[in-house]
Image (cartoon, rainbow, N blue to C red):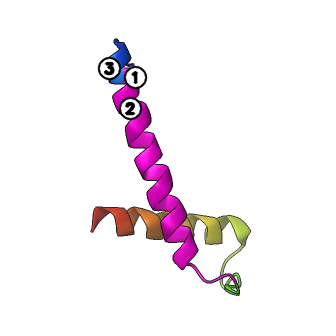
Amino acid sequence: MPTSDREARDVLAELEREHRQFRAYLAGVRVGTRIPADCDRDEFRERILDGFSDHVED
């Protein structure tokens, strides 16, 4: 938990950077992408999030 205003600003700045990165990543996911037949909606969502995690870690 942030204990000072500076720490809180740093945390918020980091979250804003991650949000921008995620939006840029999603922009790269094709709009016409369909959920593969081998998974349901929730699993597809997890695949997208896992792909983003891998993208950020690279």
Assess disc 3: are there few (<14), some (14-19) or many (≥20) residues with their C-alpha within 10 Å of its C-alpha: few
Taking 6 as reference, is 16 left or right? right
Magenta-colored span: 8-31
Where does the N terminus fall, quadrant-wise? top left
Q: Which mark is residue 6?
A: 3
The residues tagged by marks 2 and 1 sit, at their Cα atoms, a distance apart of 5 Å
For residue 26, what is the image quadrant?
bottom right
Residue at disc 2, secondary structure = helix
**Residue 6 at x, y = what percent?**
32, 20
Q: Nearer the viewer, mark 3 or mark 2?
A: 3
For residue 45, what is the image quadrant?
bottom right
Q: Is residue 51 above or below residue 3?
A: below
Give the residue number, with chain letter if any, for mark 2: 11
* Residue sitting at the far top: 3
Residue drawn at point x = 44 percent, y = 33 percent = 12
Residue at disc 3, secondary structure = helix
Give the residue number, with chain letter if any, for mark 1: 8
Q: Are marks 1 and 3 in contact (CB under 8 Å)?
A: yes
The residues tagged by marks 3 and 2 sit, at their Cα atoms, a distance apart of 9 Å
Q: Is residue 2 above or below residue 37?
A: above
Q: Please, what is the three-letter code of the amino acid marked with disc 3? A: Arg
Q: Please, what is the three-letter code of the amino acid marked with disc 1? A: Ala
